[in-house]
Image (spheres, helix red, strand yellow):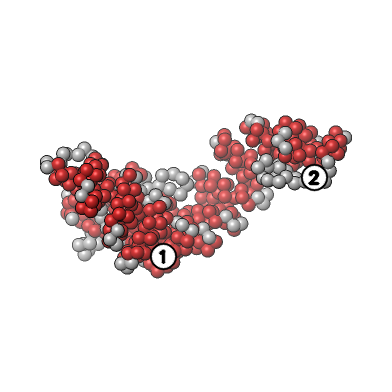
Amino acid sequence: MRWWQEDAGVAPRSKHSEADLAAAARAGDVNAAHQLGRLRAQRGDREGARHWWERAAAAGNLDSVFNLGVWHEKHGGLDDAVRWYELAAGLGDLEAAISLATLLLDRRGDRARARWWFEQAARGGAHRAARPLALLYEDAAELKCAREWHRRAAASGDLCSADDLGFLAYAAGEEEETLHWWEFGARGGHPGSAYHLGLLLQAGRDPEGAEAYYRLAAKAEHPGAASWLGAIALSRRDLRGARAWFERAGEAGRLGDQRMAGFVCVELGDPGAAARWWERAARGGDTEAAYHLGLLLIAERGDLDAGRRWFEEAARRGHRRAAEELGTLLGREPAAEPAAEEVPGVPAEPELLARAELTAAATGRRGEPGLDADALAEILGTWDLVTRPLLDRGDVVGWLTERSGMPRPSIEHLASVRAAILRPGTTPWPSTTETLLVRGTARTLRSRLC
Protein backbone atom coordinates (compact mmCIF):
# COMPACT_ATOMS: atom_id res chain seq x y z
CA MET A 1 0.00 0.00 0.00
CA ARG A 2 1.58 3.21 -1.15
CA TRP A 3 1.17 6.93 -1.02
CA TRP A 4 -2.41 8.08 -0.55
CA GLN A 5 -2.79 10.94 -3.02
CA GLU A 6 -4.20 13.99 -1.29
CA ASP A 7 -6.42 14.82 -4.26
CA ALA A 8 -7.56 11.29 -5.08
CA GLY A 9 -10.91 11.51 -3.33
CA VAL A 10 -11.99 9.24 -0.48
CA ALA A 11 -9.04 7.60 1.25
CA PRO A 12 -8.96 3.84 1.83
CA ARG A 13 -10.19 2.81 5.26
CA SER A 14 -7.82 1.10 7.67
CA LYS A 15 -9.01 -2.02 9.48
CA HIS A 16 -7.49 -0.64 12.68
CA SER A 17 -8.01 2.58 14.58
CA GLU A 18 -5.27 5.16 14.52
CA ALA A 19 -4.60 4.58 18.17
CA ASP A 20 -4.16 0.83 17.59
CA LEU A 21 -1.84 1.51 14.65
CA ALA A 22 0.22 3.97 16.72
CA ALA A 23 0.58 1.49 19.53
CA ALA A 24 1.60 -1.29 17.17
CA ALA A 25 4.02 1.00 15.32
CA ARG A 26 5.70 2.06 18.56
CA ALA A 27 6.03 -1.60 19.46
CA GLY A 28 7.96 -2.19 16.23
CA ASP A 29 5.22 -3.29 13.78
CA VAL A 30 6.61 -2.10 10.41
CA ASN A 31 3.34 -2.42 8.48
CA ALA A 32 1.49 -0.48 11.17
CA ALA A 33 4.06 2.32 10.89
CA HIS A 34 3.57 2.40 7.13
CA GLN A 35 -0.23 2.51 7.43
CA LEU A 36 0.00 5.19 10.09
CA GLY A 37 2.06 7.29 7.72
CA ARG A 38 -0.66 6.91 5.09
CA LEU A 39 -3.35 7.99 7.55
CA ARG A 40 -1.33 11.06 8.52
CA ALA A 41 -0.86 11.91 4.82
CA GLN A 42 -4.62 11.47 4.34
CA ARG A 43 -5.44 14.24 6.73
CA GLY A 44 -2.67 16.55 5.60
CA ASP A 45 -0.17 15.91 8.39
CA ARG A 46 2.91 15.91 6.16
CA GLU A 47 5.49 15.79 8.92
CA GLY A 48 3.64 12.99 10.70
CA ALA A 49 3.50 10.97 7.49
CA ARG A 50 7.19 11.50 6.91
CA HIS A 51 8.05 10.50 10.49
CA TRP A 52 6.25 7.15 10.36
CA TRP A 53 7.41 6.32 6.84
CA GLU A 54 11.00 6.97 7.86
CA ARG A 55 10.58 4.55 10.79
CA ALA A 56 9.01 1.95 8.50
CA ALA A 57 11.67 2.47 5.81
CA ALA A 58 14.45 2.07 8.36
CA ALA A 59 12.94 -1.31 9.23
CA GLY A 60 12.87 -2.39 5.57
CA ASN A 61 9.37 -1.46 4.32
CA LEU A 62 9.86 -0.86 0.58
CA ASP A 63 6.56 0.96 0.08
CA SER A 64 7.59 3.47 2.71
CA VAL A 65 10.92 4.00 0.97
CA PHE A 66 9.06 4.77 -2.24
CA ASN A 67 6.59 7.04 -0.46
CA LEU A 68 9.44 9.06 1.00
CA GLY A 69 10.66 9.65 -2.54
CA VAL A 70 7.19 10.92 -3.45
CA TRP A 71 7.03 13.00 -0.24
CA HIS A 72 10.30 14.77 -0.98
CA GLU A 73 9.37 15.26 -4.64
CA LYS A 74 6.12 16.95 -3.58
CA HIS A 75 7.13 18.73 -0.38
CA GLY A 76 10.87 18.49 0.13
CA GLY A 77 13.97 18.74 -2.01
CA LEU A 78 15.15 17.15 -5.23
CA ASP A 79 18.28 15.60 -3.72
CA ASP A 80 16.32 13.80 -1.02
CA ALA A 81 13.69 12.62 -3.52
CA VAL A 82 16.44 11.19 -5.73
CA ARG A 83 18.08 9.52 -2.74
CA TRP A 84 14.89 7.74 -1.60
CA TYR A 85 13.81 6.77 -5.11
CA GLU A 86 17.27 5.40 -5.81
CA LEU A 87 17.17 3.36 -2.63
CA ALA A 88 13.77 1.90 -3.54
CA ALA A 89 14.80 1.30 -7.15
CA GLY A 90 17.96 -0.43 -6.02
CA LEU A 91 15.79 -2.80 -3.98
CA GLY A 92 13.81 -3.72 -7.11
CA ASP A 93 10.93 -1.24 -7.07
CA LEU A 94 10.16 -0.62 -10.77
CA GLU A 95 7.87 2.36 -10.15
CA ALA A 96 10.64 3.97 -8.13
CA ALA A 97 13.05 3.36 -11.01
CA ILE A 98 10.66 5.17 -13.40
CA SER A 99 10.12 8.05 -10.97
CA LEU A 100 13.88 8.33 -10.44
CA ALA A 101 14.62 8.29 -14.16
CA THR A 102 11.95 10.93 -14.78
CA LEU A 103 13.38 13.22 -12.10
CA LEU A 104 16.93 12.76 -13.36
CA LEU A 105 15.85 13.58 -16.90
CA ASP A 106 13.40 16.42 -16.30
CA ARG A 107 14.96 18.13 -13.29
CA ARG A 108 18.66 17.42 -13.65
CA GLY A 109 19.09 16.77 -17.36
CA ASP A 110 21.12 13.67 -16.53
CA ARG A 111 20.25 11.66 -19.63
CA ALA A 112 22.79 8.87 -19.05
CA ARG A 113 21.53 7.94 -15.57
CA ALA A 114 17.91 8.44 -16.60
CA ARG A 115 18.37 6.04 -19.48
CA TRP A 116 20.01 3.47 -17.20
CA TRP A 117 17.11 3.52 -14.75
CA PHE A 118 14.44 3.51 -17.47
CA GLU A 119 16.17 0.46 -18.91
CA GLN A 120 16.24 -1.29 -15.53
CA ALA A 121 12.52 -0.68 -15.19
CA ALA A 122 11.73 -1.72 -18.76
CA ARG A 123 13.80 -4.89 -18.56
CA GLY A 124 12.09 -5.66 -15.26
CA GLY A 125 8.69 -5.59 -16.97
CA ALA A 126 7.51 -2.01 -16.44
CA HIS A 127 5.87 -1.38 -19.82
CA ARG A 128 5.54 2.37 -19.44
CA ALA A 129 9.32 2.73 -19.20
CA ALA A 130 9.78 1.41 -22.74
CA ARG A 131 8.72 4.52 -24.63
CA PRO A 132 10.81 7.10 -22.70
CA LEU A 133 13.73 4.70 -23.02
CA ALA A 134 13.17 4.48 -26.77
CA LEU A 135 13.10 8.26 -27.05
CA LEU A 136 16.39 8.56 -25.18
CA TYR A 137 17.96 6.07 -27.55
CA GLU A 138 16.60 8.14 -30.44
CA ASP A 139 18.22 11.25 -28.99
CA ALA A 140 21.53 9.40 -28.87
CA ALA A 141 21.05 8.37 -32.55
CA GLU A 142 21.04 4.70 -31.51
CA LEU A 143 18.11 3.92 -33.76
CA LYS A 144 18.33 0.13 -33.65
CA CYS A 145 17.81 0.16 -29.87
CA ALA A 146 15.21 2.93 -30.17
CA ARG A 147 13.13 0.89 -32.58
CA GLU A 148 13.37 -2.22 -30.41
CA TRP A 149 12.04 -0.40 -27.34
CA HIS A 150 9.36 1.37 -29.38
CA ARG A 151 8.27 -2.09 -30.60
CA ARG A 152 8.01 -3.32 -27.02
CA ALA A 153 6.06 -0.23 -26.04
CA ALA A 154 3.72 -0.59 -29.02
CA ALA A 155 3.20 -4.27 -28.26
CA SER A 156 2.08 -3.30 -24.75
CA GLY A 157 -0.44 -0.82 -26.14
CA ASP A 158 1.48 2.45 -26.51
CA LEU A 159 0.12 3.78 -29.81
CA CYS A 160 2.41 6.81 -29.72
CA SER A 161 5.33 4.42 -30.08
CA ALA A 162 3.57 2.78 -33.02
CA ASP A 163 3.34 6.21 -34.65
CA ASP A 164 7.02 6.82 -33.86
CA LEU A 165 7.95 3.50 -35.46
CA GLY A 166 6.14 4.60 -38.59
CA PHE A 167 8.21 7.77 -38.74
CA LEU A 168 11.50 6.00 -38.04
CA ALA A 169 10.75 3.58 -40.87
CA TYR A 170 9.65 6.43 -43.15
CA ALA A 171 12.88 8.34 -42.54
CA ALA A 172 14.82 5.17 -43.39
CA GLY A 173 12.92 4.69 -46.65
CA GLU A 174 11.18 1.52 -45.42
CA GLU A 175 7.70 2.13 -46.80
CA GLU A 176 6.20 -1.29 -46.02
CA GLU A 177 7.31 -1.01 -42.40
CA THR A 178 5.93 2.51 -42.29
CA LEU A 179 2.60 1.28 -43.62
CA HIS A 180 2.50 -1.52 -41.03
CA TRP A 181 3.04 0.68 -38.00
CA TRP A 182 0.76 3.51 -39.04
CA GLU A 183 -1.96 1.01 -39.83
CA PHE A 184 -1.35 -0.60 -36.42
CA GLY A 185 -1.70 2.79 -34.75
CA ALA A 186 -4.72 3.82 -36.80
CA ARG A 187 -6.59 0.61 -36.05
CA GLY A 188 -5.83 1.09 -32.38
CA GLY A 189 -7.37 4.57 -32.41
CA HIS A 190 -4.36 6.88 -32.82
CA PRO A 191 -5.58 9.82 -34.97
CA GLY A 192 -2.05 10.91 -35.90
CA SER A 193 -1.26 7.48 -37.32
CA ALA A 194 -4.49 7.49 -39.31
CA TYR A 195 -3.63 10.90 -40.73
CA HIS A 196 -0.05 9.99 -41.54
CA LEU A 197 -1.21 6.79 -43.22
CA GLY A 198 -3.63 8.88 -45.29
CA LEU A 199 -0.74 11.10 -46.39
CA LEU A 200 1.38 8.06 -47.25
CA LEU A 201 -1.40 6.62 -49.40
CA GLN A 202 -1.95 10.02 -50.99
CA ALA A 203 1.75 10.21 -51.84
CA GLY A 204 1.46 6.74 -53.37
CA ARG A 205 -1.42 7.87 -55.61
CA ASP A 206 -4.15 6.04 -53.71
CA PRO A 207 -6.62 8.89 -53.10
CA GLU A 208 -9.51 6.61 -52.13
CA GLY A 209 -7.47 4.86 -49.44
CA ALA A 210 -6.14 8.22 -48.28
CA GLU A 211 -9.63 9.65 -47.93
CA ALA A 212 -10.74 6.69 -45.81
CA TYR A 213 -7.95 7.31 -43.31
CA TYR A 214 -8.47 11.09 -43.36
CA ARG A 215 -12.06 10.43 -42.35
CA LEU A 216 -10.91 8.10 -39.57
CA ALA A 217 -8.53 10.79 -38.26
CA ALA A 218 -11.17 13.51 -38.61
CA LYS A 219 -13.51 11.57 -36.32
CA ALA A 220 -10.95 12.34 -33.60
CA GLU A 221 -10.89 16.03 -34.64
CA HIS A 222 -7.52 15.91 -36.42
CA PRO A 223 -7.29 19.36 -38.09
CA GLY A 224 -4.93 18.25 -40.87
CA ALA A 225 -7.35 15.52 -41.88
CA ALA A 226 -10.21 18.03 -41.91
CA SER A 227 -8.15 20.27 -44.20
CA TRP A 228 -7.54 17.48 -46.71
CA LEU A 229 -11.22 16.50 -46.64
CA GLY A 230 -12.07 20.13 -47.35
CA ALA A 231 -9.81 20.10 -50.38
CA ILE A 232 -11.32 16.81 -51.57
CA ALA A 233 -14.86 18.19 -51.21
CA LEU A 234 -13.85 21.34 -53.06
CA SER A 235 -12.41 19.30 -55.94
CA ARG A 236 -15.85 17.68 -56.24
CA ARG A 237 -17.56 21.07 -56.14
CA ASP A 238 -19.24 20.10 -52.87
CA LEU A 239 -19.06 23.63 -51.50
CA ARG A 240 -21.10 23.02 -48.37
CA GLY A 241 -19.01 20.00 -47.47
CA ALA A 242 -15.82 21.93 -48.18
CA ARG A 243 -16.98 24.79 -45.97
CA ALA A 244 -17.76 22.46 -43.09
CA TRP A 245 -14.34 20.78 -43.28
CA PHE A 246 -12.34 23.98 -43.75
CA GLU A 247 -14.17 25.58 -40.84
CA ARG A 248 -13.34 22.60 -38.60
CA ALA A 249 -9.69 22.89 -39.57
CA GLY A 250 -9.82 26.67 -39.20
CA GLU A 251 -11.21 26.42 -35.69
CA ALA A 252 -7.96 24.66 -34.76
CA GLY A 253 -6.06 27.83 -35.72
CA ARG A 254 -4.82 26.80 -39.17
CA LEU A 255 -4.50 30.08 -41.09
CA GLY A 256 -4.57 28.53 -44.55
CA ASP A 257 -7.82 26.75 -43.76
CA GLN A 258 -9.34 29.91 -42.32
CA ARG A 259 -8.48 31.62 -45.59
CA MET A 260 -9.97 28.75 -47.62
CA ALA A 261 -13.14 28.84 -45.50
CA GLY A 262 -13.47 32.49 -46.49
CA PHE A 263 -13.14 31.71 -50.20
CA VAL A 264 -15.77 28.97 -49.99
CA CYS A 265 -18.12 31.26 -48.07
CA VAL A 266 -17.85 33.81 -50.89
CA GLU A 267 -18.72 31.09 -53.41
CA LEU A 268 -21.74 30.19 -51.29
CA GLY A 269 -22.91 33.80 -51.19
CA ASP A 270 -22.13 34.39 -47.51
CA PRO A 271 -19.79 37.43 -47.49
CA GLY A 272 -20.37 38.05 -43.79
CA ALA A 273 -18.92 34.64 -42.87
CA ALA A 274 -16.12 35.14 -45.39
CA ALA A 275 -15.21 38.44 -43.75
CA ARG A 276 -15.11 36.81 -40.31
CA TRP A 277 -12.82 34.00 -41.48
CA TRP A 278 -10.52 36.30 -43.41
CA GLU A 279 -10.26 38.70 -40.49
CA ARG A 280 -9.38 35.84 -38.19
CA ALA A 281 -6.68 34.62 -40.59
CA ALA A 282 -5.41 38.15 -41.23
CA ARG A 283 -5.07 38.84 -37.50
CA GLY A 284 -3.00 35.67 -37.32
CA GLY A 285 -0.60 36.99 -39.96
CA ASP A 286 -2.05 35.72 -43.25
CA THR A 287 -1.36 38.47 -45.81
CA GLU A 288 -3.50 36.93 -48.55
CA ALA A 289 -6.49 36.91 -46.21
CA ALA A 290 -5.82 40.54 -45.27
CA TYR A 291 -5.74 41.49 -48.96
CA HIS A 292 -9.02 39.72 -49.78
CA LEU A 293 -10.66 41.10 -46.65
CA GLY A 294 -9.80 44.60 -47.85
CA LEU A 295 -11.37 43.87 -51.26
CA LEU A 296 -14.49 42.40 -49.65
CA LEU A 297 -15.07 45.27 -47.22
CA ILE A 298 -14.90 47.79 -50.05
CA ALA A 299 -16.95 45.79 -52.56
CA GLU A 300 -19.67 44.50 -50.21
CA ARG A 301 -19.90 47.23 -47.60
CA GLY A 302 -18.37 50.26 -49.26
CA ASP A 303 -16.12 50.60 -46.21
CA LEU A 304 -13.11 52.35 -47.74
CA ASP A 305 -11.44 53.08 -44.41
CA ALA A 306 -11.55 49.47 -43.23
CA GLY A 307 -10.47 48.22 -46.65
CA ARG A 308 -7.57 50.65 -46.67
CA ARG A 309 -6.41 49.48 -43.22
CA TRP A 310 -6.26 45.86 -44.34
CA PHE A 311 -4.48 46.79 -47.58
CA GLU A 312 -1.94 48.68 -45.48
CA GLU A 313 -1.46 45.66 -43.24
CA ALA A 314 -0.94 43.31 -46.20
CA ALA A 315 1.29 45.78 -48.06
CA ARG A 316 3.43 46.27 -44.96
CA ARG A 317 4.16 42.55 -45.08
CA GLY A 318 5.16 42.68 -48.73
CA HIS A 319 1.89 41.90 -50.55
CA ARG A 320 2.33 43.55 -53.96
CA ARG A 321 -1.33 43.60 -55.07
CA ALA A 322 -2.40 45.07 -51.73
CA ALA A 323 0.18 47.84 -52.23
CA GLU A 324 -1.26 48.50 -55.70
CA GLU A 325 -4.84 48.66 -54.38
CA LEU A 326 -3.69 50.99 -51.63
CA GLY A 327 -2.01 53.24 -54.19
CA THR A 328 -5.23 53.36 -56.21
CA LEU A 329 -7.26 54.26 -53.14
CA LEU A 330 -4.85 57.02 -52.18
CA GLY A 331 -4.49 58.28 -55.74
CA ARG A 332 -0.76 57.73 -55.96
CA GLU A 333 1.80 55.17 -56.99
CA PRO A 334 2.42 52.58 -54.30
CA ALA A 335 5.53 53.25 -52.27
CA ALA A 336 8.38 50.83 -52.62
CA GLU A 337 8.20 48.26 -49.84
CA PRO A 338 11.31 47.07 -48.04
CA ALA A 339 9.63 43.77 -47.30
CA ALA A 340 10.17 40.78 -49.56
CA GLU A 341 8.14 40.97 -52.74
CA GLU A 342 5.11 38.72 -52.88
CA VAL A 343 5.84 35.65 -54.95
CA PRO A 344 2.86 33.94 -56.61
CA GLY A 345 2.33 30.43 -55.32
CA VAL A 346 2.89 27.40 -57.46
CA PRO A 347 0.28 24.65 -57.62
CA ALA A 348 1.48 21.21 -56.55
CA GLU A 349 -0.12 17.84 -57.18
CA PRO A 350 -1.78 16.20 -54.15
CA GLU A 351 0.90 13.51 -53.94
CA LEU A 352 3.59 16.21 -53.76
CA LEU A 353 1.68 18.09 -51.07
CA ALA A 354 1.42 14.85 -49.10
CA ARG A 355 5.19 14.26 -49.34
CA ALA A 356 5.81 17.80 -48.17
CA GLU A 357 3.53 17.34 -45.16
CA LEU A 358 5.11 14.01 -44.27
CA THR A 359 8.58 15.56 -44.35
CA ALA A 360 7.43 18.47 -42.20
CA ALA A 361 5.84 16.05 -39.71
CA ALA A 362 8.90 13.79 -39.66
CA THR A 363 11.26 16.67 -38.91
CA GLY A 364 8.98 18.19 -36.27
CA ARG A 365 7.90 14.98 -34.55
CA ARG A 366 9.77 15.47 -31.26
CA GLY A 367 8.52 18.98 -30.52
CA GLU A 368 11.25 20.67 -32.54
CA PRO A 369 10.21 23.19 -35.21
CA GLY A 370 9.68 21.07 -38.30
CA LEU A 371 10.41 22.13 -41.85
CA ASP A 372 7.84 24.41 -43.48
CA ALA A 373 5.43 22.21 -45.44
CA ASP A 374 4.46 25.13 -47.71
CA ALA A 375 8.11 25.78 -48.58
CA LEU A 376 8.68 22.08 -49.30
CA ALA A 377 5.57 21.94 -51.48
CA GLU A 378 6.75 25.02 -53.36
CA ILE A 379 10.11 23.36 -54.06
CA LEU A 380 8.43 20.19 -55.35
CA GLY A 381 5.82 22.08 -57.35
CA THR A 382 8.42 24.33 -58.95
CA TRP A 383 10.50 21.41 -60.20
CA ASP A 384 7.37 19.76 -61.58
CA LEU A 385 6.36 22.99 -63.30
CA VAL A 386 9.66 23.99 -64.89
CA THR A 387 10.55 20.50 -66.16
CA ARG A 388 7.23 19.78 -67.89
CA PRO A 389 8.48 20.85 -71.34
CA LEU A 390 11.47 18.53 -71.06
CA LEU A 391 11.15 15.35 -73.12
CA ASP A 392 14.60 13.86 -72.54
CA ARG A 393 15.15 13.42 -68.78
CA GLY A 394 18.76 12.36 -69.15
CA ASP A 395 20.31 15.57 -67.79
CA VAL A 396 17.59 17.62 -66.15
CA VAL A 397 20.07 19.65 -64.10
CA GLY A 398 22.10 20.56 -67.18
CA TRP A 399 18.97 21.52 -69.10
CA LEU A 400 17.71 23.76 -66.27
CA THR A 401 21.15 25.32 -65.85
CA GLU A 402 21.38 26.15 -69.55
CA ARG A 403 17.85 27.53 -69.85
CA SER A 404 17.85 29.55 -66.63
CA GLY A 405 21.41 30.82 -66.65
CA MET A 406 21.69 29.90 -62.96
CA PRO A 407 24.79 28.26 -61.43
CA ARG A 408 24.77 24.48 -61.78
CA PRO A 409 25.52 23.91 -58.04
CA SER A 410 22.32 25.80 -57.15
CA ILE A 411 20.25 23.55 -59.42
CA GLU A 412 22.01 20.46 -58.08
CA HIS A 413 21.21 21.55 -54.53
CA LEU A 414 17.55 21.97 -55.49
CA ALA A 415 17.57 18.49 -57.04
CA SER A 416 19.16 17.01 -53.91
CA VAL A 417 16.58 18.52 -51.56
CA ARG A 418 13.78 17.40 -53.86
CA ALA A 419 15.16 13.84 -53.77
CA ALA A 420 15.32 13.89 -49.96
CA ILE A 421 11.62 14.81 -49.81
CA LEU A 422 10.42 12.36 -52.46
CA ARG A 423 12.69 9.44 -51.57
CA PRO A 424 13.20 9.43 -47.79
CA GLY A 425 16.25 7.56 -46.59
CA THR A 426 18.39 8.31 -49.64
CA THR A 427 19.88 11.49 -48.17
CA PRO A 428 19.46 13.31 -44.82
CA TRP A 429 16.56 15.69 -44.36
CA PRO A 430 17.44 19.26 -45.37
CA SER A 431 17.94 21.85 -42.65
CA THR A 432 15.67 24.86 -42.24
CA THR A 433 18.38 27.09 -43.72
CA GLU A 434 18.78 24.77 -46.70
CA THR A 435 15.05 24.73 -47.28
CA LEU A 436 14.84 28.53 -47.37
CA LEU A 437 17.86 28.75 -49.65
CA VAL A 438 16.47 26.17 -52.06
CA ARG A 439 13.05 27.80 -52.04
CA GLY A 440 14.80 30.99 -53.16
CA THR A 441 16.42 29.02 -55.99
CA ALA A 442 13.00 27.65 -56.95
CA ARG A 443 11.51 31.13 -57.08
CA THR A 444 14.35 32.39 -59.25
CA LEU A 445 13.82 29.46 -61.60
CA ARG A 446 10.13 30.24 -61.92
CA SER A 447 10.81 33.91 -62.56
CA ARG A 448 13.19 33.01 -65.40
CA LEU A 449 11.40 30.05 -66.99
CA CYS A 450 7.68 30.60 -66.41
The quarter of the image holding the C terminus is bottom left
Is residue 305 visible to us here?
yes
Question: Could you tell me which secondary element the residue under label 1 belongs to?
Answer: helix
Q: Amino acid at mark 2?
A: Ser
Q: Nearer the viewer, residue 427 or 228?
A: 228
Name the residue located 49 percent from the left edge and 46 percent from the top edge.
141
Bin the neighbour count of mark 2 within 10 Å (Cα to Cα): few under 14, some 14-19, many 20 and up.
Answer: few
Name the residue located 29 percent from the left edge and 44 percent from the top edge.
437
Q: CA distance from mark 1 to mark 2?
A: 56 Å
Is residue 359 visible to us here?
no
Q: Position of residue 249 (x, y in %)?
A: 39, 55
Q: Earlier in the sequence, mark 1 or mark 2?
A: 2
When the figure is inspected, residue 419 is found, relative to residue 34, above or below; the finding is below
Name the residue located 82 percent from the left edge and 38 percent from the top edge.
18
Name the residue located 54 percent from the left edge and 44 percent from the top edge.
136
Q: Position of residue 189 (x, y in %)?
A: 53, 60
Q: Position of residue 196 (x, y in %)?
A: 44, 58
Position of residue 392 in the picture relative to residue 256 (left or right): left
Tag on residue 312? none
The quarter of the image holding the N terminus is top right
Bin the neighbour count of mark 1 within 10 Å (Cα to Cα): few under 14, some 14-19, many 20 and up.
Answer: many
Give the residue number, with chain letter if any, for mark 1: 210
Which label sits in the foreground, 1 or 2?
A: 2
Tag on residue 14? 2
Q: Nearer the viewer, residue 357 or 2?
A: 2
Position of residue 154 in the picture relative to residue 260 (left or right): right
Question: Could you tell me which secondary element the residue under label 2 belongs to?
Answer: loop
| Labelled pair 1, 2 in contact (Cβ < 8 Å) | no
Position of residue 166 in the picture relative to residue 53 (left or right): left
Which of the 4 image quarters holds residue 268?
A: bottom left
Q: Position of residue 165 (x, y in %)?
A: 51, 55
